[in-house]
Amino acid sequence: GAGVSQSPSNKVTEKGKDVELRCDPISGHTALYWYRQSLGQGLEFLIYFQGNSAPDKSGLPSDRFSAERTGGSVSTLTIQRTQQEDSAVYLCASSPGDRVETQYFGPGTRLLVL
Amino acid sequence: SQQGEEDPQALSIQEGENATMNCSYKTSINNLQWYRQNSGRGLVHLILIRSNEREKHSGRLRVTLDTSKKSSSLLITASRAADTASYFCANPRMDSSYKLIFGSGTRLLVRP
């Protein structure tokens, strides 16, 4: 079946602009995650959604970052007033609700803030 | 930081040789996982080893785990050019199993 998809693949924006990144999880997966990967680094946890439960936002680096998950499926990560240090690859993952240990990743969105 | 470390940071080998990557972690774990990432894009889950296991095999992959040393290794045997990628270890936090803590990764280059 279809895997996790993300859009756009690449995004170039100017400092101070807002951006929205989209994630479509695998159908039926109740758990959804956002990670950030800076150049040459490992992944940094941002946020976790599980079904209808309140999301774990503890990894969001500042209040400029927010995420929503509508209808328990598609998720949008929004970065307001982007800064150059926000440049990174943003990866989304999903997993079945009862097996959150193994996560299935999308191809990521490469964000460049000029 | 709870992030683990991997070594080497980069590894270049000839096709057909074996590649060994090591991972150290800082906290107690329930399991440890290895992922592959091609060209800085999405990660692919390779293998999961539980804390009560010492060794696990999957095809040309062999993973070992030493919880006393808080370390794991990934061995790729008979490497192929297609194995060229970055390899990451990750372990879920004990208090929040959905939060994976990733190592810094090993960049593997397999020369044809």
Image (cartoon, coloured by chain):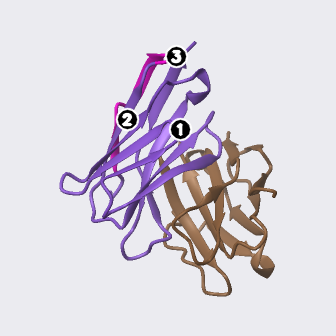
Chain colours: A brown, B purple
Does residue B66 appear in this view?
yes
| Labels 3 and 2 positioned on one and the same chain | yes
- Sequence-first tag of 3 and 2: 3
Query: Which secondary structure class fits the magenta region best?
Result: strand
Q: Quadrant of the C terminus of chain A?
A: top right
User: Three-letter amino acid code at disc 2?
Assistant: Met
Give how far across and how far down residue A101 sits, in percent: 51, 66
Q: Which numbered tag is attached to residue A39?
A: 1
Question: Separation of disc 1 and disc 2 at Cα?
Answer: 20 Å
Residue B88 placed where, x, y %? 46, 44
Q: Disc 2 designates what residue?
A: B21
Q: Amino acid at mark 1?
A: Leu
Magenta highlight on residue B7: yes
Span shown in magenta: B4-16
Q: Which residue is mark 3?
A: B15
Report, in whole angstroms, how far the alpha carbon at label 3 lies from the one at label 2: 16 Å
Q: Residue at x 66, y 58 (%)?
A: A92
